[in-house]
Amino acid sequence: MRVLTFGRPWCFRATRVFEYRRSVLTITLSVLAILLATLVGVLGHNKPMMLVPAGLSLLAGTIAVTRNAASQRLGTTRTLCVLFFTLAVMHILFGFLAAGLTTEHTSILSNDDIFFSQSMLINSVGLFAGAIGYCCSLGYRSSELIPGIPDLVDKQIAGGIFRLLLVLGSAGMFFAYWKLGFFDYISEPAKWPFMRYVTSDIFGGTAADEWIVNRAMDLISVSLPFILFCSIKRRSTTGILLSIFGYLALLLPLRRANLLAVTLTFLILLAIERQDVYRVTRKVLACAALLYIVSQCIFLFGIFESDTTPKQVLTVASTALPEVRDLGWTISLLGGETLNGVTFAQALIPLPSISSDWSSSHSLRAISTKLIGLDETRQTGGLRLTIFGEGYINFGYFGAIGAGFFWGLAVGWCEKLLQATGKHRTDFANYAAVMCFVWICFLIYLAGTQAAATVKVGGFLVLGVAWASKYRPKPAQAGLASAV
């Protein structure tokens, strides 16, 4: 019996040492691979035959590394973050394959294959660095709670505050669009696609109008998922009607990212309640991608009224995945210059962008729109770059690696939060975890610091609601608890 008693801990320690050494070996080989790919990108920057295979190898490595890490640390590969990494690989790959379809709409006059190959490799390097950060994050023990969120939150108080935020956001949205001539647009279907640009100078809008619309969207985006989930769960007719009102207000700017974020958050919360998160989310994301591409086609065909030939449909659909193309476009316009961290510094400023001329003129949106010659009209959201692409234009390849690694650490943290969700956690804790997942894995991944304001305002609102609705036992209950 003594042999068995002492043997079990020894076997357990040996297994842990073996797993630790294997993890260290995996991370070491991954770091060597990313440095080798960076060397290929620097030395062979004008040779697509070298850039493309290196990028494809890193994309394949991303899937292998994340699945291996999840299998070792979590005991399963069927997690939301592993699913997200797979979708990100597909996003970069398909974005690269479709980039050449819309070259004529950019200012890339020649060598488009070189710029797009560089862009694909840069995004692959950043995503692979994110996979390394994800592995490191899973390897460290950390709290399964969000810092600043109380353990117990009074759902009724939180629901009341969220209802107030939803009403204020929806009312602010309708007021802003009424002021900008909403009824003139709604009465003519041909003008509907242009409602997206109603806050720009050429349509009579101002920077203040755009700021009000953006903050109203933040109020709706934070409050609507929680209200809709609780209303469906409790079968509250009033809550469902209020949610429909919020969705109608969110439709006004025709910005699909906010609509998809709200819907995705709500559906993941439902899946957590039914304990079928992975399968439901996989189906939802597939449907969301299809709807996003279809809506892109409808939107652009509505603006340009072009012929719907198969080639034209394919070309228009490819604009739904512009991140690889836009990074190549940006690289060609910068001509080898870097921004030296300007866009990251701008995102860290706690003041609204309209309160500072420097902040408003040094955002990623402002810089990218200036590069393409639309710096004064605010009729576009600028070029769309992933967080890795933004890291590259600021600090080169090491910027892409650094941005990807720290983003990957955040993804790993989200993974731990999501693993702790379920019926043993409160609805508010599950909601906060899912919101963090959506912010980090979708908004920040796809938009970089362009999503900074949304994430900062959203985080402030969630923390504020959590503390305002923190469970405080009554004096009688507190005295009974202390007596026990």
Image (cartoon, grey):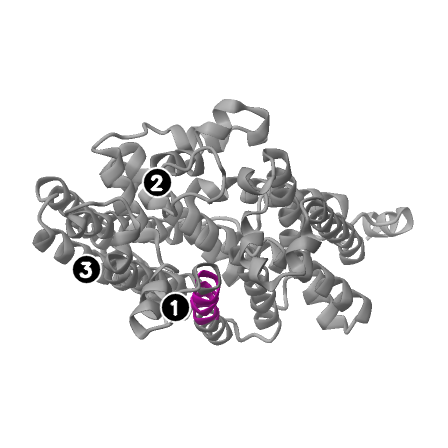
User: What residue is shown at x 54% (from left), y 64% (from top)?
Assistant: 264
Q: Is residue 168 left or right of residue 337?
A: right
Q: Nearer the viewer, mark 3 or mark 2?
A: 2
Which of the two residues, 275 or 336, is positioned nearer the viewer here?
336
Q: Nearer the viewer, mark 2 or mark 1?
A: 2
Q: Quadrant of the N terminus?
A: bottom left
Q: Amino acid at mark 1?
A: Gly
- Which label sits on residue 264? none
Q: Which residue is mark 2?
A: 390
Q: Which residue is mark 3?
A: 56
Which of the two residues, 159 or 454, is positioned nearer the viewer here?
454
- Is 291 within the magenta? yes
User: What residue is shown at x 36% (from left), y 59% (from top)?
Assistant: 319
Q: Is residue 246 left or right of residue 400?
A: right
Q: Which residue is mark 1?
A: 75
Whole-number angstrom distance, CA of label 3 to CA of label 1: 27 Å
Whole-number angstrom distance, CA of label 3 to CA of label 2: 20 Å
Q: Is residue 289 left or right of residue 113?
A: right
* Mark 1 burial class by Cα count in 10 Å: few <14, some 14-19, many 20+: few
- Residue range (magenta): 288-300
Residue 426 picture quarter: bottom right
Secondary structure under tag 2 reads helix
Q: Does residue 193 appear anywhere in the picture?
A: yes
* Mark 2 burial class by Cα count in 10 Å: few <14, some 14-19, many 20+: many
Where does residue 90 sit, x and y in percent of width and height?
A: 31, 64
Residue 372 picture quarter: top left
Residue 251 picture quarter: bottom right
User: What residue is shown at x 70% (from left), y 55% (from top)?
Assistant: 183
